[in-house]
Amino acid sequence: MEEGDLATGGRSAAAKGAWICFEDEAGQGLRPPAARSWGPRGRTPVVHVRGGGTGYVSIAGICCYKPGQRSRLIYRLHLYRGRKGESKSFAWTDYRDLLIAAHHQLGAPIVVVWDNLNRHLVPGMRAFIDEHAEWLTVYQLPSYAPDLNPAEGIWSLLKRGVLANVAVAGLPQLVRVVKRGLKKIQYRPHLIDGCLAETGLTLTYTPPTQLDFTN
């Protein structure tokens, strides 16, 4: 999707009274993201982590924007415990359910912008999008364009925040830490706005009713 497509998405949102929603995924295992820390001069800080164990949390999140409204973050988690036959990641039906939840929570049509993940492109998802065109419009980002997706900034905030250098005892604790970090972001819409600003994209109305979404 090029700049013109982004602008088209903005005009589609304005015409429908819709929210612009950027979706992306991230994940975190039991080993914490390394981050800068404080320590006595000459002594390198050491973070002790588990030597073994399995567990992984996948996060699918949507940053939602609409002029005049508080920005929102809506997310779902998928847990992988390493059990036989257990799915390691979200299925396309999980993304479908996330879109439905976003539509219900926002109470308006949504224009979704996301990447070319294979789960986004399967026939079942395409059929779902076509069947719900009255409230759902989807645009694909160009390949390898994370700089255009504000949801990438959410993961950066999370991993530089509550997850940084945190040694968890197991998957349940990791889930609690992730949820706590995401809730903090949800209650601070200026952080979600900042993630949009970092992309260089803007969301503005053009008189009388047109909406531009360009960089």
Image: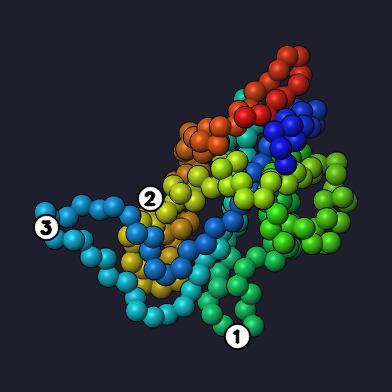
Residues at marks 1 and 3, CA–CA distance in whole angstroms: 46 Å
Q: Quick one: label 1 or label 3, which is nearer the N terminus?
A: 3
Tag 2 and tag 3, C-beta contact below 8 Å: no
Instruction: Name the residue rendered at 25%, 53% in the picture.
Output: 37
Q: Quick one: label 2 or label 3, which is nearer the N terminus?
A: 3
Residue under label 2, please give it.
161
Residues at marks 2 and 3, CA–CA distance in whole angstroms: 25 Å
Q: Position of residue 108 (x, y in %)?
A: 74, 37
Q: What residue type is labelled 2?
A: Gly
Quarter of the picture containing the C terminus is top right
Q: Quick one: label 1 or label 2, which is nearer the N terminus?
A: 1
Colouring scheme, one of rainbow, by chain, secondary structure, one colour: rainbow
Q: What residue type is labelled 1?
A: Lys
Taking the image as drawn, is residue 64 in sight? yes
Q: In this view, does 17 lie above or below 170?
A: above
Q: Is residue 163 above or below residue 62?
A: below
Along the line of sight, which residue is nearer the eye, 29 or 43? 43
Quarter of the figure with residue 117: bottom right
Q: Which amino acid does label 3 sit on?
A: Gly
Residue under label 3, please give it.
42
Quarter of the figure with residue 66: top right
Q: Is residue 6 above or below residue 48?
A: above
